Image: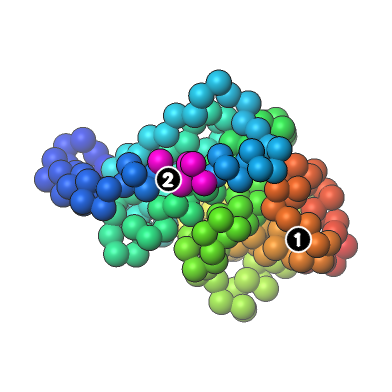
Amino acid sequence: MLGYLDVSETEKGKKALEKLKEIQVLETANNTLADCIHFMEKNNLSINADELRFGMYIADPKKLELQKGYCGFGGIPGFIQVSIYPDSYNISKIPAVIAHEFNHNIRFSYFDWNHGDVTVGDYIIIEGLAESFAKELYGEEFLGPWVTSFDKEDLDYSIEVIKDALDVKGFAEVSSYMFGDKISIEQGYKPVGLSPFAGYAVGFQAVQSFMKENNIGIAEATLLETEEIMNNCRLFGK
């Protein structure tokens, strides 16, 4: 799902690598991580790791077509990675996706992640917090297509479907709500009638609603329990 480019795709890989060098992506990554660390320290947050390792990998744009050629992973404190096939759409969004994964590093330093026990509610809040962190640092215009590609009708429908599944448990079951039908079918999960990344979009709306309704910033929200955010965000009629 991280969409790595096959090592046999030499020319395509070299082209991407040259583009990443041209845009000085390592400097961008260093600056972004410095921004994130500064925010973390300023707000007395921490990551449970002795060091932070960042990796950027060349992606296959076809594999990550729904993600517009880029994605990331930050589920293990101390490790952040981004997969990207750089283009005019996603290059400007690199800082935001790094910040998104950095927030996962913070949250998972305070909360355990268990594939078997994770609920839809847990997962949407995890992703909503991460994207809200990216918005805080870099602005809404740089957020990923996983939250920006939904019109009001699709978003309202997704909220209704997910509202009735917040307690659904287990990574395979939860993934159907997070990633939507197309990816679920590809990965062997049961489709539930949702557009790609519906859980991400709903989670972002839930966290944004919670922060606005309760006048709470992202630093404080990142350390709150799932239930506290869900029960006080007004998105699910609770």
Which of discs 1 and 2 lies nearer the camera? The answer is 2
Q: Residue at x 13, y 40 (%)?
A: 10
| Res. 198 image quadrant | bottom right
* Lateral position of residue 162 relative to residue 175, left or right: right
* Lateral position of residue 202 relative to residue 213, left or right: left
Is residue 113 something one can see in this rendering? no
Q: Which residue is mark 2?
A: 31
Query: Where is 142 relative to 47, above or below?
Result: below
Mark 2 neighbour density, 10 Å: few (under 14) some (14–19) many (20 or more): few
**Could you tell me how many numbered marks the image carries?**
2
Q: Which residue is mark 1?
A: 211
**Quadrant location of the C terminus in the rendered image:** bottom right
The amino acid on which the numbered mark 2 sits, given as a three-letter code, is Asn
User: Where are the magenta residues, as a range?
Assistant: 30-35
SS category of the residue bearing label 1: helix
Using the image, tell me which numbered label, if any, was put on residue 144.
none
Residue at the far right in the pictured view: 238
* Lateral position of residue 184 relative to residue 223, left or right: left
